[in-house]
Image (cartoon, rainbow, N blue to C red):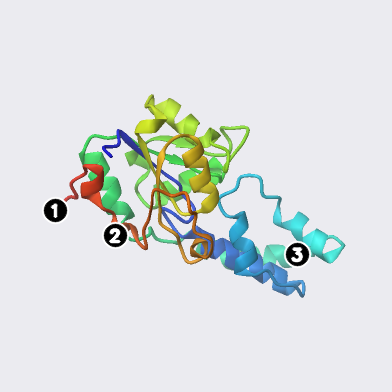
Amino acid sequence: MNPTAVIFDFDGTIADTEWEIYSYVNAVYEAHGLTTSLDAWVHSIGRADNRPLEEHLGDRLGRAPDADVIEEIKAKHWDRRHTVPMRPGVQALIETVTAAAKPLAVASSSPTSWVEPHLERLEIRHHFAAIRTRDHVEHGKPEPDLFYAAAAVLEIDPAEILVIEDSKHGCAAAKAAGMTCVVVPNRITKLDIPTDADLVLDSLEDFPYQDFNLHPLGF
């Protein structure tokens, strides 16, 4: 394939924020005498229609959760969620695609208020010609709307776009949009690897540049 553009998912793909989010949720559950397993949690990753934590917890408890406890735990986890580094190989692929004069975009099930600050913090926001989040579409992943929206901004045929994802729902959305999808699972999504991905990698450091007519910088 010779992609005309590349679209990245954000959470769990560019940075492993998924782990810190799970750690926070699990801590809240444990503080209320409950648990949530990774096997159960993985099925929610990549979706834009997940209900708020307080609603899920209220259903399990049969009552409203303790708001003060939730805020106390959030305060302890907040800084950690905002210091997560990029995953290995992400910077190299971004720089290679940019050097090849091909546009980049982000399509995320998270809100813009979450994605944009992280991209700025990681000092990569300027590489992306388009950022599309759940704020921009009616239906998020696993529906293809986010990827169609990003393609529309780039003015590129979806069939010519390569997507980098980490989750089953994200991959399903990319494939539904007619795009090629490379999945790089993280320590949570490796528990539910999609079977419809065009390629699954243990790390983006293993990205087969030659298969996509890209020449990695420094080679």
Give the CA distance from mark 1 to mark 2: 14 Å
Farthest residue in the left direction? 219
Q: Residue at x 77, y 55 (%)?
A: 55
Q: Nearer the viewer, residue 58 or 49?
A: 49
Find residue 194 and report its horizontal and vertical position in percent: 49, 54
Badge 1 marks a residue whose secondary structure is loop
In this rendering, the answer to whether 97 lies above or below 183 is above
Badge 2: few (under 14), some or many (20 or more) residues near its Cα, within 10 Å?
some
Give the CA distance from mark 3 to mark 2: 42 Å
Find residue 65 and report its horizontal and vertical position in percent: 80, 63
Q: Residue at x 68, y 69 (%)?
A: 36
- Which of discs 1 and 2 lies nearer the camera? The answer is 2
Q: Residue at x 73, y 67 (%)?
A: 69
Residue on which the image places disc 3: 68
Q: From the viewer's perspective, is 191 left or right of 197?
A: right
Say whether disc 3 or disc 1 marks the residue closer to the N-terminus: 3
On residue 218, the disc is: 1
Q: From the viewer's perspective, is 33 left or right of 210?
A: right
